[in-house]
Amino acid sequence: MNWEKKIIGAFESRYYASESETGQDRRTLRLRTSTFFPDFDNAHPDEKVSYLEAAESLERRGIIKLNWEKRGKGERLKTLTCENSEKIFEESGKPYPKTEAEKIRATLSAKVQAIRENAPAQIPAQAEQAAALLEYFSNHFGPREIGQGIDHRTMEEFVRFLEFRLGQEQAEKLTTRALSILLYRDSKRLENLLSLLGPLVSRAQKAVPLPDISFPERSYPETMIAGKIIIEFKNEKTPLVNEGGHILGLPLETAEEIAAIRPLSGNGGTVLTIENKETFYALGKPDTLNTSAAAARFDSFFYAGGYSNRAATAVIKALAASGFSFFHAGDLDPDGILILQHISELAGKPVAPLRMDAATFDQYKAWARSLDKTMLRQIGKITEKTKSIPGLADLLHRIEETGWGVEQEIIDYR
């Protein structure tokens, strides 16, 4: 083990931790052998010697100071102290975080001024929001962000991305990776950049509005709905009439444009939300609508896909706003009940369970699966309001007393 590098690395980590804890650039840092090298007493003699020699070498070069136990030097090293943290970064060949943060703040401040002076005339509001975002960064950027891997290059590349999006009306026509090559000659750089800056952008969002431009991501939430329904879209006069009750795929962009959903029958409307895809296809395909008595109870079938993604959330809210009554079919386990609870919270109205009860559990317990402790602990997240829904309290009692769960796909809903 290269103990010098490990000691230097530990002091770097302590520097960033101390800065984060206090909000100040602490110059005195301390490592205790008991925590830094807890197995010292049981380590091989050669490893002990390597550790002590590395510490003494760093002390001779004026980087750290050593504090020995009272029994005397050479027997037990108690603490290693650095009173000038700049020397730690000099030794590792890295810029001093405080100085580097000051340079980045100055660069960002200059970019703010440039954007405000050269804002495209057609998007003054977006340009001002971009400037406000960078101004927030310039006022709050510090060593903590350096420790998170955000350096001068990262911030310059983020500014390049913002400037490009402000100046390009058709930037959304590019895929994330194509845009990354265009800006950085690296197909993955933009994804890594936005991931790295995510926490900083989230903090900024609480203080200033984000610019009205899309931050690209390689995520494409989708959901599905089936049934004889009419879907009305915002700013469109012609609705989508699903007279055949076909299964319709709805990506996020389409789901967010839904203004209302109405049953073709003209009645109030009922929807069965279904946790798992296999059961959704079994119940929601058009030929089922005319042959299944259970399926005939519902005007539409919606694929929840577990905890709702953004597309599913948009459709659930549209169904609720359109006056649909909600029913849910899912796994007979704690997560299955929590998904029902989640849908009820999104819809803002009660959701009635379908075959999520003790009788169904008993019918299929021969094929139940064992639940681990982590899954069983999920029961603590189920609210009293959800437990009061008819059938769920008895189901929970079965789950708790057996430690089993029943998967939805094995249940016969005919």
Image (spheres, grey):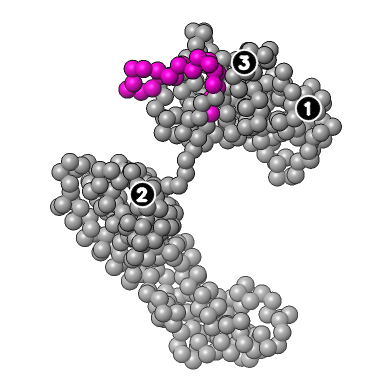
Locate residue 256 relative to residue 352 in the image: left or right: left
Residue drawn 42% across the image and 70% down it: 26
Q: Sequence order check: which comes first, mark 3 or mark 2?
A: 2
Tell me which amino acid carries mark 2. Answer: Ala
Q: Is residue 241 magenta?
A: yes
Q: Position of residue 32 (x, y in %)?
A: 59, 76
Q: Residue furthest right?
A: 366
* 3D distance between C-alphas at marks 3 and 2: 50 Å
Dot 3, how many residues are within 10 Å of its Cα: few (below 14), some (14-19), or many (20+)? many
Q: Residue furthest top?
A: 266
Residue drawn 66% across the image and 74% down it: 38
Depth check, mark 3 against mark 2: the one in front is 3
Up/down of 90 relative to 60, above or below: above
Residue drawn 57% across the image and 30% down it: 304
Q: Considering depth in this image, is 180 or 259 the residue closer to the camera?
A: 180
Residue that label 2 marks = 204
Q: Position of residue 43 (x, y in %)?
A: 71, 81
Residue that label 1 marks = 361
Up/down of 276 relative to 147, above or below: above
Up/down of 330 relative to 216, above or below: above
Q: Which residues are magenta?
A: 224-246
Helix, strand or loop status at disc 3: helix
| Quarter of the figure with residue 305 | top right
Tell me which amino acid carries mark 3. Answer: Leu
